[in-house]
């Protein structure tokens, strides 16, 4: 784990834009150490999924409060969490992420 990432939970309550639509906003909350790897085609086949925007996976130490509603900031890019896979006896979380649009 040699990368610093920021976990961003959704802000509560949800904000509204100028058209009155509900907009999700995120606040920087936790900065943690992570291992970050890009995913290749073989990884996507093993995961039995194909998503062209699926780009990376990250591992962090286990945190019970992290959900797929969070966003992650890493190297000035924002990622959405597509899936969270706990490993071992709640030792690590593997997060499959895609770059936010």
Image (cartoon, grey):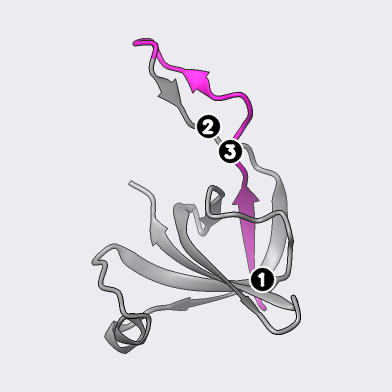
Q: Which mark is residue 25?
A: 2
**CB of mark 1 within 8 Å of CB of mark 3?**
no
Q: Is 21 above or below relative to 40? A: above
Q: Give how far apart the Cα atoms at labels 2 and 1 are.
A: 23 Å
Describe the element under mark 2 as helix, strand or loop: loop
Please identify the quarter of the rendering in which residue 52 is found: bottom left
In the rendered image, residue 70, in percent from the top left (x then y), is placed at 56, 49
Q: Which mark is residue 74?
A: none
Q: Residues within 10 Å of mark 1 (few under 14, many from 20)?
A: many
Please identify the quarter of the rendering in which residue 34 is found: bottom right
Q: Is 44 above or below relative to 51? A: below
Dot 2 or dot 3, earlier in sequence: 3
Describe the element under mark 1 as helix, strand or loop: strand
**CB of mark 2 within 8 Å of CB of mark 3?**
yes
Q: Which residue is mark 3?
A: 10
Of 86 and 35, nearer the camera is 86
The residue positioned 66% from the left and 71% from the top of the image is 60
Is residue 6 located in the magenta-colored stretch of the structure? Answer: yes
Count of numbered marks: 3
In the rendered image, residue 4, in percent from the top left (x then y), is placed at 65, 64
In the rendered image, residue 63, in percent from the top left (x then y), is placed at 74, 63
Q: Which residue is mark 1?
A: 60
Q: Is residue 17 left or right of residue 31?
A: left
The residue positioned 39% from the left and 60% from the top of the image is 98
Residues shaded magenta: 1-20
Dot 2 or dot 1, earlier in sequence: 2
Q: Give how far apart the Cα atoms at labels 2 and 3 are.
A: 6 Å
Q: Residues within 10 Å of mark 3 (few under 14, many from 20)?
A: some
Describe the element under mark 3 as helix, strand or loop: loop
The residue positioned 45% from the left and 55% from the top of the image is 79
In the rendered image, residue 29, in percent from the top left (x then y), is placed at 70, 45
């Amino acid at each position: 784990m040699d990368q610093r990432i920021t976990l961003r939970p959704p802000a509560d309550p949800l904000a509204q834009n100028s058209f009155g639509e509900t907009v999700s906003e995120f606040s920087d909350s936790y900065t943690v150490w992570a291992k970050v790897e890009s995913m290749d085609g073989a990884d996507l086949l093993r995961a039995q999924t194909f998503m062209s925007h699926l780009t990376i996976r990250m591992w962090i130490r286990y945190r019970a409060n992290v959900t797929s509603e969070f966003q992650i900031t890493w190297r000035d890019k924002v990622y959405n969490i597509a899936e969270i896979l706990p490993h071992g006896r709640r030792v690590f979380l593997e997060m499959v992420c895609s770059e936010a649009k």
